[in-house]
Image (cartoon, helix red, strand yellow):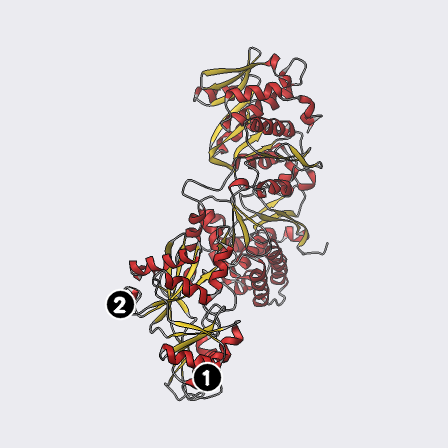
Amino acid sequence: MKKRDIEILGITHLRGPNMWTYRPVLEALIDIGELEDSPSNTLPGFYERLTAWMPTLIEHRCSYEERGGFLRRLREGTWPGHILEHVTLELLTLVGMPGGFGRARETSRRGVYKVVVRAFQEQVTQQALYGARDLVMAAIEDAPYDVTALVDQLREMADDLYLGPSTASIVDGADDRSIPSIRLNEGNLVQLGYGARQRRIWTAETDRTSAIAEGISRDKDLTKRLLSACGVPVPEGRIVDNPEDAWSAAEDIGLPVVVKPCDANHGRGVCIDLSTQAEIEAAYAIALDEGSGVMVERFVPGSEHRLLVVGGRMIAAARGDAASVTGDGRSTVRELIESQLNTDPRRGFEEEFPLNPVRVDSAVRLELSRQGLSGDAVPAEGRQVLIQRNGNVSRDVTDLVHPGVAATVSLAARIVGLDIAGIDLVAQDISRPLDEQRGAIVEVNAGPGLHMHLRTADGPARQVGRAIADHLFPPDDDGRIPVVGVTGTHGRTAVCRLVAHLLHIGGTRVGLACSEGLYLDRRMVASNDCADFESAHRLLLNRMVEAAVVENGPLTMVAEGLGYDRCLIGVVTGLDPAAQLAEHYIETPEQMYRVLRTQVDVVLPNGVAVLNAADPLVAEMASLCDGEVIFFTADPSVPELVAHRADGGRAVLVHDARLVLATGEDEVVLADTSRVPLAASGRSALDVENLLAGIGAAWALGVSTELIRTGIETFDPADLPGAHAR
């Protein structure tokens, strides 16, 4: 490699929990070559250049746990791997990607490090890592570097590849309740929950959103007729066929009126407060250009409001403001729009922005013409020019909504049939009943954008994503099926097959992913080695699966991460001190311990770790478990087991040629070993350990003693050719 260079030798995407953290990360293997002899405090001007380019690094606390902690490390002297970690994380922060977790660790090879950073989106994080490498090298070599261009590139990638803010808010709301999520495509289709307990969302639509209701909401005239029939106030109006018919309808309804498309949304093509034939006929052309038909309605005086209804309840409300500019006697209207409106940081084309940029379209030109202006006109200094009357909803008014108004919009959503609806309502005062002010609902929208409630111009942001998660999952439902994860340096397949068998005979539809294949309810659907991330995901995506049993070999855990975020049962069969993964720099028992402990780290608080008490390194993992621990061993005198039972803990053991379930000092005989094929005379000690581990997992899952006894007596070891050797 080059002298004084940072070479990225390879990048591993750990998509699930791993030896570093519960969350997906990128693990980069880097070689810093001769820079191993050049910590940051020996590089002239490096500190000044890096902090000038990235002043926000002052927020990184690092090992000192204080603001500016990382900069202190830079001054004292730290190595490029550590610097690369922090610069990558800061780049992700600058583009709005959540993160924060990072590590840089030496390997056994001089100058070679593992740099680990949180990866919410793989491609963006990888690009940030490479960009950070180039930036750090430029700072070392005193070369120019365009940090702004890099951040802009990363931000554009994030906008294209990461979840939209509405979807992300729902996923975050689910995560707050420990409901897992799986992104199903490159867009915003997301599964919440696992297997038979899953639900799906697509932005603010759910698998409860009726296609019929969505179709009704797109037909504005049909929506109005249904609402009116049920007593919900709507503006009088009708569909019109041509400009002349639009004027005729306006005369019948009474001026002023609104002209709008029958099926457009987001306020496109809507012209309001129209009082002359010329305005109405011009507005007809604008509306027709945005939709497939045109409606004329009574103009409802007041402000535009968007109320969000979720599961029959009004959750949030925002009020819109008219957009206007102030003349300076020098600038054209177009220039004033750019300088006074479109510079607002809340405006942007992506969903993350609560307000759209203002463009001089047909509707704006009509509004300007009513004031005797055009886009190229220069308003006098101090003159207020109205640009848009609607489409600027971003001020939170949730706490002001009158109970009667909340009930009305909830009724409107139910009439249309939407579980999640954005109700557009016009009223002068949202804190008063609609009938007192002739307020009305003007639209009911399926799949409403949530950004106006998440990033408000004024007032608190509302936890609308959490409300949608709560709508899909009642308080006692976390969307999880029982997941059993099995790891260790041997015996994994045997334990997985036995646990799946014991669950199956109890009537549970089991999915099994192991080195012998992929099984759905005992039907083999793949015959290759399926002890990997993708196979685990296949089980969790399947609506038929009521419980999943997943084999996790050390190599899979190091190269991919676990295929689930948390599990109900985590089994560790044993740790061979000679086991290594040298290509991943896992070369000592302590390093293998860090790999396998991941299975225990992800056990849920209401779950159980099933651990080999006869293996000291495995028994040591008991202290890491958030839930209960069940020990297993064929030797009831093992000190770890004796101490565990003295504290009232549960254990599965062999005592006087009998399989025993122990709770503290109490024992229940499960079966004589002579009646259990896996424990019969002549079977290997590993087979007995595998049997005990499988029994422990089934016991932890609540399988009855009778079913466990039947299962182990009927389980055929011939189904496990060579399994104990894996």
Residue linked to disc 2 = 436
* Front in this rendered view, residue 204 or 114: 204
Kindly identify the amino acid type of the residue bearing the numbered disc 2.
Glu
Name which residue lies at 52% across and 72% down: 291
Q: Which residue is mark 1?
A: 333
Q: CA distance from mark 2 to mark 1?
A: 38 Å
- Residue plotted at (62% across, 58% down): 127
Q: Is residue 536 left or right of residue 61?
A: right
Residue 248 bears which disc, if any? none
Residue sitting nearer the eye, 688 or 8: 688
Residue 698 picture quarter? top right
- For numbered disc 2, what is the local secondary structure? helix
Residue 159 higher or lower than 696, as above or below:
below
The residue at the point 39 percent across, 57 percent down is 462
Residue 418, horizontal then vertical, whole percent: 44, 56
Left or right: where 140 falls relative to 380 = right
Sequence order check: which comes first, mark 2 or mark 1? 1
- Mark 2 closeness class: few <14, some 14–19, many ≥20 residues within 10 Å: few
Up-down: is 110 above or below 156?
A: above
Q: Residues within 10 Å of mark 1 (few under 14, many from 20)?
A: many
Is there any visible trace of residue 669 in the rendered image?
A: yes
Query: Between residues 189 and 663, which one lies in front from this camera angle?
Result: 189
Q: Position of residue 13 (x, y in %)?
A: 62, 48
Figure check: 677 above or below 398: above
Q: Quadrant of the N terminus?
A: bottom right
Kindly tell me whether residue 365 is visible in this rendering: no
